[in-house]
């Protein structure tokens, strides 16, 4: 698949992976419809995409609102006449032990952004993707495949996302629409600084050492673009991520113990 003159709708486009992915696709000559909640940040990405050689428009969007998602798709069609790719990238995280939660609304908030936002955008884009025999992309996480202590709500939302798009892939057999689920691990973005804590407020700083063990945004985007070009079924990043499903199948208790050990180690270094 080549992205020259292809119309790509991308949520969560104002920062991090979304911003870098937009610019990389613009460099291939794509038409980009960029969605996020921050109009000023979106306009900066539009400018960067234009300078990279693509065309881009900004559509301020809150993906938790179905009417916003419908308007996003309508404006994409109005601007470019078709939709070839939808990339569901908008996301938010949470970091806290479940028994320390004081604001239960964080579970609804994380689920509405990560899961329902993808459902809403996909619902309104699907007729157009069928017409173009296009590509659906879900930016999930390795957390969509295994448990991660202190991230129960985030893990649940990514498991929901994985299950939804796996099911949709089967339903769309024969339509020409392919479904790609991308599962990054830790990537050097600010998502963990913006993660919600036990009280429902953003942490403001990452709970882990961001100088260690993170994949660069550029490498993450490179893998994403390659998977999109090949219209793959999945792109699981890192050797560890690829090994997890097999280890879970053969030695599920070991995976639990390793995850618990990692959480305890992190807690001890925070004291």
Image (tube, grey):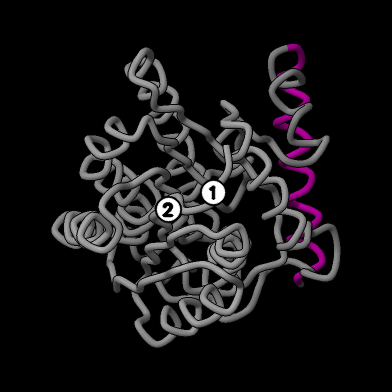
What residue is rendered at 58% in x and 79% in y? 51
Q: Is residue 59 left or right of residue 135?
A: left
Vertical placement of 19 versus 162: above or below?
below
What residue is rendered at 55% in x and 60% in y? 29
> Principal SS element in the magenta part?
helix
Crowd tier of the residue under label 2, counting other residues whose Cα lies within 10 Å: few below 14, some 14–19, many 20 or above: many
* Pointer 1 residue: 3
Q: Looking at the image, do the residues carrying marks 1 and 2 touch, with CB atoms under 8 Å apart?
A: yes
Q: Secondary structure at mark 2?
A: strand
- Residue 255 in the magenta stretch? The answer is yes
What residue is rendered at 61% in x and 73% in y? 52
Total marks in image: 2
Q: Secondary structure at mark 1?
A: loop
- Residue 156 in the magenta stretch? The answer is no
> How far across and how far down the image is residue 93, in percent?
50, 59
* Pointer 2 residue: 8
> How far across and how far down the image is residue 14, in percent?
47, 73
Can you tell which quarter of the image residue 19 is in?
Answer: bottom right
Can you tell which quarter of the image residue 90 is in?
Answer: bottom left
Where are the magenta residues, as a range? 250-270
Q: Which mark is residue 171?
A: none
């Amino acid at each position: 698949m080549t992205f020259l003159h292809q119309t790509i709708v991308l949520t969560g486009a104002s920062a991090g992976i979304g911003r870098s992915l937009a610019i990389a696709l613009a460099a291939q000559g794509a038409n980009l419809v960029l969605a996020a909640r921050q109009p000023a940040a979106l306009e900066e990405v539009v400018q960067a995409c234009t300078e990279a050689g693509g065309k881009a428009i900004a559509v301020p969007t809150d993906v938790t609102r179905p009417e916003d998602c419908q308007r996003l798709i309508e404006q994409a069609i109005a601007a470019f006449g078709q939709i070839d790719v939808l990339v569901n990238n908008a996301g938010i995280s949470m970091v806290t032990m479940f028994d320390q939660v004081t604001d239960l609304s964080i579970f609804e908030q994380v689920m509405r952004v990560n899961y329902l936002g993808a459902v809403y955008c996909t619902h309104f884009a699907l007729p157009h993707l069928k017409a173009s025999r296009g590509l659906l992309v879900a930016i999930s996480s390795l957390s969509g495949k295994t448990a991660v202590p202190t991230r129960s709500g985030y893990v649940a939302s990514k498991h929901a996302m994985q299950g939804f798009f796996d099911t949709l892939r089967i339903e769309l057999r024969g339509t020409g629409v392919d479904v790609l689920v991308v599962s990054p691990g830790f990537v050097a973005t600010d998502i963990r600084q913006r993660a919600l804590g036990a009280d429902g407020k953003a942490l403001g700083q990452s709970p882990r050492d961001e100088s260690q063990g993170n994949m660069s945004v550029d490498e993450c985007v490179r893998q994403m673009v390659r998977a999109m070009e090949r219209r793959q079924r999945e792109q699981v990043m890192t050797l560890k991520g690829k090994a997890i499903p097999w280890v879970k199948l053969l030695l599920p208790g070991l995976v639990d113990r390793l995850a618990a050990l990692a959480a305890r180690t992190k807690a001890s270094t925070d004291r």
